[in-house]
Image (cartoon, helix red, strand yellow):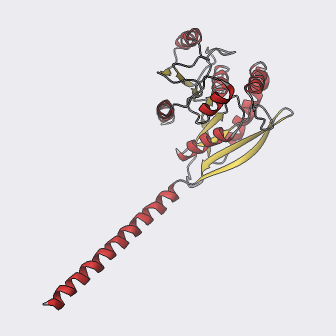
């Protein structure tokens, strides 16, 4: 009897170990399959507009075989940095090909708000040059082997949002534009040249975006008759999508703050827009 009890216990132990090993192997297999589904490849690119050299970054899932929409990503007034590249990678994970572009030239970055303001103003005050730089990046994106050139959108942050909206208002070949914590008092307001679906995601407590400018922007958009969405997140301040906002705000005495919920909601709104436009 004792022998049979020991035998049964041995069988149970072996069975338990075997089940755990099988389950572990199944999890490992599933993890490998997930890893194989998305494989983001990021590549630095250099392009030019007139005599200005720009440094960009293209990200895409190299495991996808079909052509896909291309998304232009425009940096904050700090310049082309790691943040804008991270956003390009996130778009690649969603199945798009994204190019983080350089609007200042030579990958120039600002270390202080004074410099950032000067760099941004130099772009927005010379629209022919800004347009040439944007279009140069647009052509690079359209020519990429993974991109469907008939499906293009642009997103931008802060200064980049204003650039994206302005380019769309100038008639850029875009299906959609999403602007985050962006000024809406633009050098070219929405009008008959606008073709893109527009989404603006701003903080309701952003002191850089006046109520008057929002009213004027909405009136101009309403006059176009085009579909658009303007979202103001309660309590959110400027630069709410950037995790570096708090440190920058404290360092330079600026009303900047990261807001995780507004960041999450605005990204979801962008995805919804793209789902609708590119369906």
The residue lying toward the viewer, choosing from 85 and 99, is 85
> Toward which corner of the image does residue 98 lie, by quadrant?
top right
Q: Please name the residue shown 73% across and 35% down the image.
A: 102
**Residue placed furthest toward the left:** 1
Q: Position of residue 55 (x, y in %)?
A: 76, 40
> Toward which corner of the image does residue 129 lie, by quadrant?
top right
Horizontal side of 80 relative to 255 (left or right) equals: right
Horizontal side of 37 relative to 174 (left or right) equals: left
Can the viewer see residue 158?
yes
Task: State how many labels appear.
Answer: 0
Q: Please name the residue shown 55% across and 10% down the image.
A: 211
276 relative to 168, above or below = below
Horizontal side of 220 relative to 167 (left or right) equals: left
Q: Position of residue 1 (x, y in %)?
A: 12, 90
Q: Position of residue 260 (x, y in %)?
A: 49, 34
Can the viewer see residue 142?
no
Q: Position of residue 236 (x, y in %)?
A: 51, 24
The residue lying toward the viewer, choosing from 62 and 175, is 62
> Toward which corner of the image does residue 141 lie, by quadrant?
top right
């Amino acid at each position: 009897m004792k022998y049979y009890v020991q035998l049964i216990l041995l069988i149970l132990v072996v069975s338990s170990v075997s089940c755990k090993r099988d389950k572990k192997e199944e999890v490992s297999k599933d993890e490998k399959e997930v890893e194989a589904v998305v494989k983001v490849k990021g590549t630095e690119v250099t392009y030019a507009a007139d005599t200005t050299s720009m440094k960009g970054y293209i990200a895409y899932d190299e495991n996808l075989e079909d052509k896909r929409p291309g998304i232009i990503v425009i940096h904050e007034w700090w310049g082309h940095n790691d943040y804008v590249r991270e956003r390009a990678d996130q778009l690649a994970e969603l199945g798009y090909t994204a190019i983080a572009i350089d609007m200042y030239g030579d990958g120039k970055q600002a270390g202080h708000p004074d410099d950032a303001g000067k760099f941004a103003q130099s772009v927005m005050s010379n629209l022919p040059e800004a347009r040439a730089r944007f279009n140069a990046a647009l052509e690079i994106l359209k020519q990429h082997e993974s991109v469907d050139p008939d499906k293009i959108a642009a997103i931008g942050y802060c200064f980049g949002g204003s650039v994206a909206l302005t380019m769309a208002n100038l008639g850029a070949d875009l299906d959609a534009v999403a602007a985050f914590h962006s000024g809406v008092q633009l050098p070219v307001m929405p009008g008959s040249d606008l073709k893109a679906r527009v989404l603006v995601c701003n903080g309701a407590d952003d002191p850089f975006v006046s109520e008057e400018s929002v009213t004027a922007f909405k009136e101009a958009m309403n006059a176009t008759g085009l579909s658009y969405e303007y979202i103001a997140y309660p309590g959110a301040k400027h630069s709410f999508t950037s995790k570096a906002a708090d440190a920058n705000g404290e360092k330079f005495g600026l009303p900047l703050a990261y807001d995780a919920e507004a960041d999450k909601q605005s990204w979801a709104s962008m995805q919804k827009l793209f789902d609708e436009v590119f369906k």
